Structure formats: C-alpha cells, structure tokens
Image (cartoon, coloured by chain):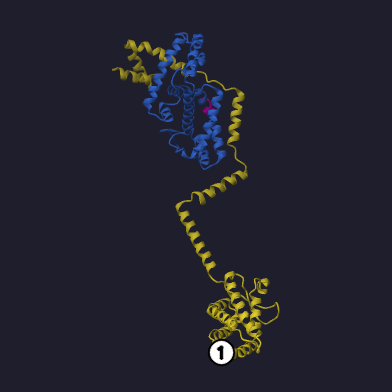
Amino acid sequence: MAPRVKFKTDGKYEDGILLMKNAETDILQQAMSGSRSAFGKLVELHQEKVLYLAYDLMGDWDDAKDAAQETFIRAFQKLSRFEGKSRFSSWLYRITVNLCMDIHRKRKRQATDALDAETEENLPDLKENGSAFRENTLEYTELKGEIDAALTTVSINQRTAVVLKFFHELSVREIADIMECSESTVRIHLFRAMKRLKETLREVA
Amino acid sequence: MDRKTLEKQMKLYLNGEMSEPEKVAFENLLADMEIAVEDLPEMHRTARALHTRRRPSPPPELLQNYQQELKTSFADPPLYLRWQKRMAELWRALVIQPSPALRFAEVAFLMILGIYVGRSLLQTPDVVVVEDSYNNSGMFYPNLRGVSEANRDQIREMLFGSEQLLLEIINTGDDEDFDEVEWELNRELADELLKIVVPMQQRAIQLNHPETLRFLSKMEIFLYDMANMESEEVAEALPFLKELVLETSLHLEVRRLMDFYKEETPADLSV
C-alpha cells in the first residue's frame, strides 16, 4: 500500500486533493522549464475561473474575455517569477485583479465624467427592478442583476474584495495575498463595501 | 465593549470568520445592544444576497471562442520554431550574455587563436624544393608559394641589376672607346648591388635554393672588383672581366634565375 502523503496548502494539510495537486505541481514544473504545452494544460484547468473573475470585476463578457486571455499571456511571460509561495491559482488571480484594476483606472481617467453619468443613470433602473429586496419576504436568488449593478457603485478595491470573498469564496488571507495588502485592509474594504451595498440595495427596495 | 471592538467583531461575524460558539455569543451580545441590532439584519441580508448570487453564464459562442483561442495560443509550436528558439537561446548563452566563466574561456580561446595565427603569418614558411620537371635543366626550383611579393621583388631587382652589368661588359668591344661617364654609372650600380647582396644571400638560404646562393657568391666577387676599380684601370681590366663573365657563364645563369623568379614559376604551377 502506497504511503499516504500529506500536501501542504496555505498552511493547512489537505490529503483529499493530493493527487490533483501533485499532478498540477508536475505540470507547473514542466511549464516553468519552458514547455508551452504544459502551460496549455494549466490554462485548461484555470481558464473558466479566470474568465468568471474577470467578468465579476469588469462586468462585461467581451472585456472579461480579453482580460482573461491577457492574464494567461502575462502569466506565461512571468512564469519564471512564480516562487510557489502561494497557490498557482492565487497567483493567476493576482494577475487578473491587477490587470482589471489597470484597465478600470485607465478608463476612469479617460472618461471620468461619462462613467459618473452612467452610474447615476443606473440607479433609477435599480430602483425600478429592486422589488425583490424586501424585508422578510426576500427572494435572494432573484437579486443577481441588482447586486451586479450595485457593485458598480463601490470602489474597484472594495468591489474586488467583495467579488473574491462572496463570489469566489476565498478567505480574507487569500484575498490579502491576491490584492497584495494586509488582512486588516481587506476587512476594511469588505466592511465599507457592505455598508455601501446595504445603502444602495435599500434604495432599490 | 467599546465601539472599535464591536465593529471588529461585527466584521468577523459578517465575513463568516467566527466559530459557532463565538457566533452565538456575539448574537447574544448584539441582542442586548439596540443600535447594533438595528443594522445587523440588513447587513446580514446583504451578505446572504451576495453569497447566493447566481453565477452568470457567458454567451456560449464567446466561451467557445475564448477556449479555442487559448488552446491555439498555448499549443506546441512547430518543430522548426522550437529549433529556432533553441538556437536563439544558445546564441544568447554563448555570445550575447555568456556566463563569466564562459566569457573567460572565450577570451582565452580567442587569444590563443590570435597568437597561433599571428605566429603563422610572421614565420617564413618552409620552402619545398621541387625538381625541375619543366625544362629538364637539372636545377631545382624553389617553391615560392607563401613567399611574399616584396621578397620576390627584392630578388628580381638584384637579378635584373646583375644582368644589366654583365651584358654591359660582354657587349663592350675590345677596340671600343671607353666612356668614362658610362662606366661611372656602372660602378655606382655595382656598389648598390654589393650593399644588398648579403641580405639576398640570407633570403636564398631561407628559400633553401643552392643555385641562387651559388650565383650570388660568384656575383659578389665580381661586384666587389667593379665597385673598387679606378677609372684609369678600367680600360686595362675590361677584357679580363669580359673573359671572367664568359668563363663562368654568369650572364646565362642570371637569365635562368630570372625565369625562376617570374610571377609564376614552373614549380608554382606544378603544386
């Protein structure tokens, strides 16, 4: 019987995903030694998660597709810099988040006024469609559109923290690692975002 | 509990980072605090709403294109491109950015190569003497391949001057009037040739050509006599010099040697 080896992931020992993780580590090592096809396998493993994250941050599928593709290209170019201190998926998320933040900042700089006007215009629509958010009789699953729209009213950092926490179910520690800030900062982003979202959704209701 | 601690606890509670006993304790605490309890249900609902948000699906065509484009981007490149990349990496490692040890080795190799090539160029090549199969004269031709053009010119100059002097003596008739000016010019020429006869002998030794060396030795005596002859002695000595040239056949020998040192000797052609 083969010995049961434990695989350390972010300080926790998980043996249930040992085989999958080991396989990914092997592929990662091949990719780091320059194998393009090995990196292609890693892309296959993570392409959907990265696309969804980019969508959650950008709010548009075409933009998300471009950002996700750029993420993998950058990851391949910078693969030698991956030190293995965090999970590969976290590293990919970090690239995606940075990329989306860059795009967001660029767009904001280019058309700050236009973006503000658009946000203002979205709020009345929110109010019209926000009947689902009512005390005691809430149908939370119907809130998809309203939540996505409400997320555009918070800052990009707060939005990133919320998206990673609630949509991608990462721990605060992982979010801090991805956003390259302290855990306290992540908590502050989350708390402020929650307060803001609460206000926005109350207006909708 | 102060406000800061309360907010901190609330963040942990809303982020779902509390254990079950902590959660119950906190909820009990909130129940006693009117203000916090007012905010909490709405925050709680917001958090639940975020947690239960349905994941949107991308348009199928977009997803398909996205997956296909990524697959194409990271597929293995063709064999020739892989080789091209490897050669580029090798070139970079050897030439553009070599390691210090490799750079040292390259410099050392280039220095050794430079010394070897430099020495080869400076050294006089060994002369291969080839038997004359061109005119069956029994003489040996020096193989002049590798002998510089400047060295050949020096030998040709020596031979040309020698022939000029020898023909002058032979062609002067016994009853001819002696021209003092013309003889002075011949004497100067003999003097000039006498100065370069020693270097020419060394060159002949280097070329390992006994015929040239022998001719130069005979010519040296002749030139010495001519260069040191006084004007009044010339008329008397001329018949003896003429006889000497004819006896030793120096005028024929010089002609033959001049043929050897033409731009392309028979020996050169035969190699």
Q: What hue does chain B carry in this figure?
A: yellow
The numbered mark 1 sits on a residue in which chain? B
Reply yes or no: does residue B211 show up in magenta: no
Instruction: Please give the range of residues in magenta.
Output: A48-52
Residue A8, above or below B63: below
Q: Nearer the viewer, residue A36 or B188?
A: B188
At 63% from the left and 82% from the top, the residue drawn is B168
Q: Nearer the viewer, residue B224 or B239?
A: B239
- Residue A134 image position (x, y, % from top left): 46, 9
Q: What hue does chain A carry in this figure?
A: blue
Any part of residue A145 in sight: yes
Task: Name the residue that disc number 1 marks.
Answer: B233
- Residue B126 image position (x, y, % from top left): 57, 73
Badge 1 local density, few (<14 within 10 Å), some, or many (20+)? Answer: few
Residue A159, above or below B140: above
Q: Nearer the viewer, residue B5 or B210?
A: B210
Dominant secondary-structure state across the stretch colored magenta: helix
Judging from the image, what secondary structure is the residue with disc 1 in?
helix
